[in-house]
Amino acid sequence: MRDVYIIGAGIHPFGRTEGRSGRDQGVFAVRQALADTGLDWADIECAYGGSSAAGSADIMVNELGLTGLPFINVANGCATGGSALAAARNAVAAGEYDIALAVGFDKHERGAFNAKPKEWGLPGWYGQTGMMLTTQFFALKLQRYMQLHGISRETLGRVAEKSFRNGEKTDHAWRRSPIDLETILHAPVVNDPLTKYMFCSPAEGGVALIVASEKKVRALGADAVKIASIAVRTRPPGSFEVFAPSISVERGGAPTTLASQGAFETAGIGPEDIDVAQLQDTESGAEIMHMAENGFCADGEQEAWLAEGRTEIDGVLPVNTDGGCIACGEPIGASGLRQVYENVVQLCGRGGERQVPNMPKTAYSHVYGAPGLSAVAILER
């Protein structure tokens, strides 16, 4: 397999954009990524992309140009973006193409995600109890984790406080006003123990990444970031993930743990070698649980990590430097690619006020989605 590099990145600001469709936002991101490389749309040899609620990605060719390229639609829940990047990377790594595109976009209605049980292979009672409303599932899962590992509500609040503080420094973030810890902790509770400021919201946005072979990087003289590894994994026996109707007496692993281990093994490095990380933070508790599942700390150590500021931009492991899902919102198709976009920005030293000091050399992104799958990508500069 050949080495693969990201040579162009584009993003449409996340949030709400009246009068512009989700696909329009994806097209905006593609054109920005093309401008970042100096390439034309006709130079793209293949494409992978998707959305959850804004239509098929391949229809983008109506706006971008009818070049006849193979354009594969990707649908993999919240891991759609990470899966599109994995497919684009694999196509170039296998030698089939030299330049490929990964793109994701979305435009959701206001309010929490509330899927239909039948569409996910679940019985009707699961929806009747309200468990298809993802905020309830995540809150229940988090309550169990907090009891087992001694996580406090204050630590949940610290995650959200950091997210809003980082979002203030990010051009593409939706929520760009800092919110103090006391306000977060005493805000109306959505699902105990989570207040309204501890959740992300369904949103809009688009992200595009252009990847290329080493041969093409040299030919173009491109400013490139290497994709050291990508891993996508689903649920192992005994896991307890979103939309699970029961929990095993004997716990098993988690898709995030499997994806993380697979990505580190391929990259030949460990968690201690990562300089900056973007982790799925559907709500504050998700970032905390995913810190451990991705191997960055042990269960329960998050209390000290957050209290001591270790995940701040100037900490030992900056996490969600652009404000993550909590500040940016979550357009499903674009969310995983936003994480990689932010890591490209950080590795290239383009982060401005949110730039991680001392020029990071390695970056990690993790996206998680229903019904329990994860994608991890490790980048190197």
Image: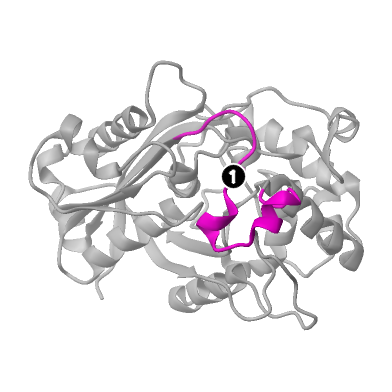
For image coordinates 77% across by 83% down, the residue present is: 250
Seen from the viewer's position, the closer of residues 25 and 327 is 25
Q: Is residue 178 magenta?
A: no
Q: Is residue 287 visible?
A: no
Image quadrant in which you'd find residue 330: top right
What predominant SS class does the magenta segment belong to?
loop
User: Residue type at mark 1?
Assistant: Pro
**Whole-percent x and y of residue 307?**
86, 49
For image coordinates 86% across by 27% down, the residue present is: 183
Q: Which residue is mark 1?
A: 357
In the rendered view, would you say 140 is above or below 344? below
How is the model colour-coded?
A: one colour
**Whole-percent x and y of residue 352?**
52, 31
Q: Is residue 110 magenta?
A: yes
For image coordinates 91% across by 31% down, the residue present is: 186
In the picture, the quarter occupied by the N terminus is: bottom left
Seen from the viewer's position, the closer of residues 211 and 290 is 290
Q: Is residue 33 visible?
A: yes
Instruction: Locate residue 126 relative to residue 97 in the image: left or right.
Output: right
Seen from the viewer's position, the closer of residues 2 and 286 is 286
Marker count (numbered): 1
What stretch of residues is rendered in magenta? 107-132
Q: Residue furthest front?
A: 124
Seen from the viewer's position, the closer of residues 278 and 131 is 131
